[in-house]
Image (spheres, grey):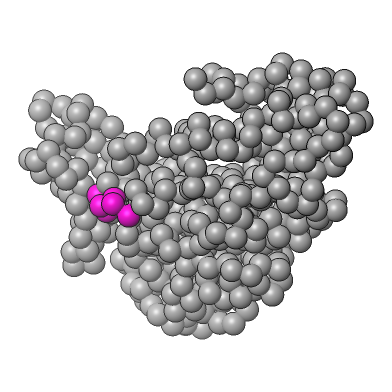
Amino acid sequence: MTRLFSRRYFLGTLAAASAAGAGHAAPPAESLRPVLRGEDFFKRAVRSVEDILREAKLAGKVSFAVSNTSTGQGLETQEAAVGRPPASVAKAITALYALDTLGAEHRFETQLLATGGVVDGMIMGDLVLVGGNDSTLDTDALANMAANLKEAGIVGVKGAFKVFEAGLPVLPRIDPKQPDQVGYNPGVSSLALNYNRVHFEWKRANGNYAVTMEGRTKKYRPSVRMAAMQIRDRSTPIYTYEDRNGVDAWTVARGALGRGGSRWLPVRKPGLYAGEVFQSVAAAQGLRIGAPQLVELLPAGEVLVRHQSPTLRRILKDMLKWSTNLTAEMMGLAASTQRAGKPQSLQESASRMNKWAIENLGMTEVSLVDHSGLGDDSRLTAKDMVTALLKVHSEGLREILKPIAMRDEKRKVINDHPIQVHAKTGTLNFVSSLAGYLTGPDGTEMAFAIFAADEDIRATLTRAEREGPAGGVSWNRRAKRMQQQLIERWGVLYGA
């Protein structure tokens, strides 16, 4: 049976360690098994790396490194120079890249501007919704912008309603290898709304289904036309998608719907989505405007309304907590655009970030293909990740990383566990990563990175299987148990 250290076991180990006296030496710079003098207590009280990996059935599929943050001393490694998929741990690099480029207090701004001037409340030219790289924009914010437009005295628009989303590359999805329906793989542009997801809901009555597609928040439920759903009499596939005449055209299998339910689906046309929702909330303010028209060049005009995002630091803290792929991509692209002009693709932007990481974080083999870690071809080494964590240790990354709970044998949170962990998790099918900082019972702080991946199994998965492959959940649970066991091992050996 798998055993996670309990608090009682952990503290008992510490007490026994103290009783063993000072007859042991400090561990060497890098080793799989610390070499100790005197009564070899730790070898009996702490499970070996080999045992931990064997129990998790992950031998040969794990890389890790751990170092003391005060001295930089390497404490223990396992295949630390082997590049593995980092999954969302890549977002920690993106956060550092964005902070270094834009600054922690930077705010993104979404605008409404008028061309042709304003006469007696009438916009003589066009009204333009301008995306400003704010990944947190939602329907509530657009409704507030519409209200502010009314308060500014605007009563009508003689020209068209236009939308500018081309401040960043306009992409239909982050990773083309993901299933169509997963909400974590939406379109990307400089204009995002509700994290570029549309709320699909179905209700059954009298044998038929009522279906809605909405830009929903708690306060508003505007319907959209740019995403449409049709029910098909089939069992599989559950969803299909196609771009049909400028519409995100979905179908869903009737056999999968049951009595009712809902889910968020990805939006492939962010500009049209935001434009249609703004058209709806503007109408609620009595302002009738035409259907949104996308423009590739930003027209000159007078800014009438501005909406500012939270600070970049706040956005990144939420991104690292919730692991939002769209935020990572937009922040990385915004940083690349600020540094050297708009890139043409995520790969080009990630390449710029890789170069920055080598020059500024001391990394040597960083190879990311996007800013979120979603792409299959991204690789990081545990050695490089720990090098970066050591480099920025005093620059506040720990404060925006997510606290990671330690758990007992029944997976219940141990609130008073002697080890504290702040880290970034990463999860893909048969990939589980964790990197950040741990503080031992005596206050010793360490930087660590653990990358686990079964790339052989991943290579067999079809695109359709990627939303929930057989065996994926149990594999992930074993990997997470392994991560905690390694962390508690390091806490006993190096932080007690």
Going 57% across and 22% down the picture, which residue do you hit? Answer: 3
Going 69% across and 29% down the picture, which residue do you hit? Answer: 46
Image quadrant holding the C terminus, namely top right
Going 20% across and 26% down the picture, which residue do you hit? Answer: 259
Asked whether 174 falls inside the magenta stretch, the response is no
4 sits left or right of 99 in the view:
left
74 sits left or right of 453 in the view:
right
147 sits left or right of 405 in the view:
left
Give percent across and percent down for residue 100. Answer: 70, 67
Task: Give the extent of the magenta segment.
Answer: 459-464
Give percent across and percent down for residue 252. Answer: 18, 44
Give percent across and percent down for residue 399. Answer: 74, 47
Q: Residue furthest right?
A: 22
Residue 8 in view here: yes
Nearer to the camera, 97 or 253: 97
Q: Quadrant of residue 344?
A: bottom left
Give the answer, above or below, for where 425 lies relative to 485.
below
419 sits left or right of 333 in the view:
right
Nearer to the camera, 40 or 411: 40
Give percent across and percent down for residue 167. Answer: 49, 75
